[in-house]
Image (cartoon, helix red, strand yellow):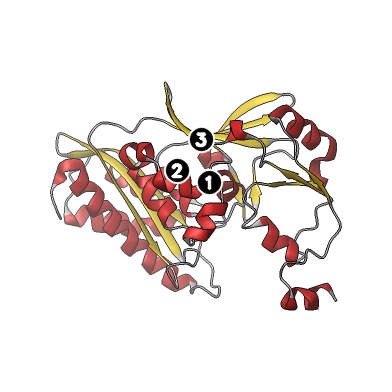
């Protein structure tokens, strides 16, 4: 009955739940400690509400972050750039700090959904939804971001590579809340690129990729390559990275590295593309992203 209702009136949430709107972070953490697995966090709601309407999840308690201004905002700190987990994606897209200091993240966030979605969705929600295709995740992975999680027992810092555990699953404990993302200052004279293929401009990625690298003495030094929608979680293409480090970025080397990404991915076939297509798309996106990153790092076009 409820699924039939949803097809007619998508405003209906066909489950009973208790709504909480804590006014402080401490109050929110106490609610999480009390309700644990029975609670879900409402930040922007662009993923949560859809899943609730489809009855994919049926939380008994909803804890809204709407009043927690301390979880919003972008600022430069000694350790890099601090982004509150409840910061709207649109605010990140329009931030001069992000555009100037972290253009890779800026480009990735612009690729998420529509302006309407970005006006509602938050960076923390995009990460905690734990979609293997999350655009922000691959950019933050290439940038070496750290995620700050907090409970009533204290705070812990999770490297983004350790955050995703599977589709819809993260390293957060039921009593923990993602409070902030901290991105270290990018190295001097680095190159970067973000690439995405989707069925439409508003669809989630069929494949996405992010690259950050530096050149030293004409050779690749730092190198991070991240891919999404090609494994149960966003992944680093570590074998390709290792193949590139310390070597001159010739066209032949770039081609070899792009072929090696298949060693770190395990794509599936779904409505957005076949596994075979995702393999070939991953190679092409990484090759293009590497070439553009090398050009931006001062290595010239290749």
Instruction: Point out the image quarter for the C terminus.
Output: bottom left
Measuring 16% from the left and 42% from the top, which residue is drawn there?
Answer: 298
Residue beneath the point at 18% across and 48% down: 295
Helix, strand or loop for disc 1 = loop
Q: In which image quadrant can residue 251 be found?
A: bottom left
Residue 60 vs residue 22, the one in the foreground: 22
Q: Is residue 181 above or below residue 37?
A: above
Instruction: Look at discs 2 and 3 and give the one toward the viewer.
Output: 3
Distance from the alpha carbon under mark 1 to that under mark 3: 9 Å
Q: Which residue is mark 1?
A: 88
Q: Is residue 233 visible?
A: no
Question: Which of marks 3 and 1 precedes in the sequence?
Answer: 3
Q: Secondary structure at mark 2?
A: helix
Q: Percent x, y for residue 262?
A: 41, 59
For label 3, the residue is 73
| Label whose residue precedes the other's in the sequence (2 or 3) | 3
Looking at the rendered image, the disc whose residue lies closer to the viewer, 1 or 2, is: 1
Q: Label 3, secondary structure: give it.
A: loop
- Residue 21: give x, y in percent of width and height: 75, 41
The answer to whether 139 is drawn above or below residue 75 in the figure is: below
Rendered position, 272 above or below 148:
below
Identify residue for label 2.
140
Residue sitting nearer the eye, 282 or 148: 148
Whole-Å distance between the Cαs marked 2 and 3?
17 Å
181 or 283, nearer to the observer: 181
Residue that sits furthest to the top in the current view: 78
Q: Is residue 295 visible?
A: yes
Residue contact at pointers 1 and 2, CB within 8 angstroms = no
The label on residue 223 is none
Indicate the quadrant where residue 175 lies: top right
């Amino acid at each position: 009955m409820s699924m039939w209702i949803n097809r007619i009136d998508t405003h209906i949430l066909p489950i009973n739940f208790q709504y909480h709107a804590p006014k402080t972070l401490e109050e929110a953490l106490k609610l999480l400690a009390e309700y644990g697995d029975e609670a879900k966090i409402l930040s922007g709601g662009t993923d949560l509400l859809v899943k609730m309407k489809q009855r994919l999840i049926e939380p008994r308690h909803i804890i809204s972050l709407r009043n927690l201004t301390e979880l919003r905002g972008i600022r430069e700190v000694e350790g890099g750039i601090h982004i509150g987990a409840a910061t709207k994606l649109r605010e990140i897209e329009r931030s001069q700090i992000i555009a100037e200091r972290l253009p890779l993240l800026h480009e990735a966030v612009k690729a998420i959904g529509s302006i309407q979605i970005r006006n509602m969705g938050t960076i923390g929600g995009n990460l905690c939804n734990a979609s293997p295709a999350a655009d922000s995740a691959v950019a933050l992975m290439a940038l070496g971001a750290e995620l700050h999680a907090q409970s009533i027992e204290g705070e812990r810092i999770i490297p983004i590579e350790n955050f995703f555990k599977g589709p819809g699953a993260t390293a957060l404990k039921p009593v923990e809340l993602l409070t902030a993302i901290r991105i270290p200052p990018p190295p001097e004279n680095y190159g970067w690129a973000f690439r995405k293929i989707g069925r439409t401009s508003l669809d989630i990625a069929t494949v996405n990729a992010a690259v950050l690298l530096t050149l030293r003495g004409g050779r690749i030094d730092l190198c991070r390559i991240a891919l999404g929608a090609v494994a149960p979680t966003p992944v680093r293409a570590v074998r390709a990275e290792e193949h590139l480090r310390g070597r001159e970025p010739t066209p032949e080397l770039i081609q070899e590295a792009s072929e090696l990404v298949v060693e770190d991915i395990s794509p599936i076939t779904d409505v957005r593309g076949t596994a075979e297509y995702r393999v070939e798309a991953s190679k092409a996106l990484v090759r293009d992203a590497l070439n553009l990153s090398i050009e931006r790092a001062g290595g010239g076009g290749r």
